[in-house]
Amino acid sequence: GTGTPLLQVSNVEVIYNSVILVLKGVSLAVPKGGITALLGGNGAGKSTTLKSISNLLRSERGEVTKGRITYRGEQIYGLNPSDLVSRGVIQVMEGRHCFEHLTVEENLMTGSYTRKASRGDIDADLEMVYTYFPRLKERRRSQAGYTSGGEQQMLAIGRALMSRPETILLDEPSMGLAPQLVEEIFNIVKSLNEEQGATFLLAEQNTNVALRFAHYGYILESGRVVMDGPAADLRENPDVKEFYLGMS
Ligand code: ATP
C-alpha cells in the first residue's frame, strides 16, 4: 500500500462572503515526493483550494464550512501561515508579491523564517537557491521591482525555498510568462522535486505543460473535481484532449 498521503483534502466546501458557495466538496490527496497538479479553467476553484490549505481565505472573506484538511494525518485547518511553515508547508501566491524596493537577495532572506537560523545556515540556503536559479544570483543586487516577470516568479519560489519546506503550494506559476520561461520554471520545479525531494501541489490553467511535469492531476470544474488520474493517463484521455489540450 501507499499509506497515508502527506496532505489530504477531504470533502472541503468553501463559501465567500457567507453566501457564495465556491468549493462544493473537493477531495484530493498529495503524496510525499510527488508533483500533483490542480487543473481547470478560470474560476474553477484552483486558487481557492490552495488558499483553503494555507489558510489565506479569511482576508478574502472566505471560509471552509465543511470537510477536513490534514497534513501528516493531523488536522491543519485554521493554522496561521507561520505555523504551517514550521510544519513544512508554504504557499507561493499567484502574482508573485516580492518586496519591490528590496534587492533580490534581501527578498530571499525574508524567506528564512526560522528564527534560529544562523548566518551560516542562511548563506547555505542562499547558495542552494542560487544553484537552482542562477539568474537570481546574477541579479542578486538588483532591486526586485526592476526584475522581469520570469525573475520575479523565480524569486517567489526561491523565497519559499529559504524556509526549507517539505511541501510547496504553487499558484499558477506560468501566469504571464513566455513559453520558454514557463518551460524553464517547470524544469526547475522538476529538479527540486527529484533532487531535494520537495513535494508540490500546483494550480495551473496551462494543462499542457502541467501534465508533462506532474505525476498526478485533478481537474476542477465549478468547484468540483470532475476527473483525476496519473498525468500520463489524463494526457491520453479523449475528454481532456478535447476540452483542455486540444485548443492550442
Ligand atoms: P483563476 O485562475 O482565475 O484564479 P481559479 O480556478 O483559481 O481561477 P478561484 O480564484 O479559486 O478560481 O475562484 C473560484 C470562484 O470563486 C470564482 O468564481 C471567483 O469569482 C470566486 N471568488 C474568488 N475569490 C472570491 C472572493 N474573495 N469573494 C467572492 N468570490 C470569490
Image (cartoon, rainbow, N blue to C red):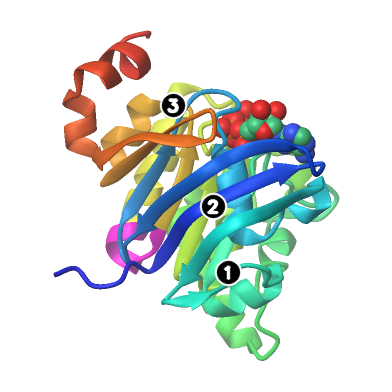
Q: Earlier in the sequence, mark 2 or mark 1?
A: 2
Estimate how packed mark 1 is, as few (under 14), some (14 to 19) or many (20 or more) residues with alpha carbons within 10 Å. many
Which residue bears the numbered disc 1?
Answer: 162
The magenta stretch spans residue 219? no
Q: Distance between the residues labelled 2 and 1?
A: 30 Å
Q: Do the residues labelled 3 and 1 touch (CB within 8 Å)?
A: no
Is label 3 or label 1 in front?
Answer: 3
Left/right placement of residue 228 relative to residue 204 reads left
Inspect the image, locate mark 2, and give the three-letter code of the amino acid beneath it: Val
Give the magenta-colored segment's residue range. Answer: 192-199
Query: In the structure shown, which secondary structural element does the residue marked by tag 1 occupy?
Result: loop
Residue sitting at 66 percent across and 91 percent down? 116
Q: Which residue, given by chain and number where applicable, does mark 3 sit on?
A: 206
Q: Which of marks 3 and 2 is nearer the N terminus?
A: 2
Q: Quadrant of ligand 1?
A: top right
In the displayed structure, 168 sits above or below 202; it is below
* 2 or 1: mark nearer the eye: 2
- Residue 131 rendering spot, x and y as whole percentages: 43, 60
Label 3: few (<14), some (14–19) or many (≥20) C-alpha neighbours in 10 Å: some
Residue, disc 2: 12
Which amino acid, by three-letter code, is at mark 3? Asn
Look at discs 3 and 2 and give the one toward the viewer: 2
Q: Which amino acid does label 1 sit on?
A: Met
Quadrant, the N terminus = bottom left
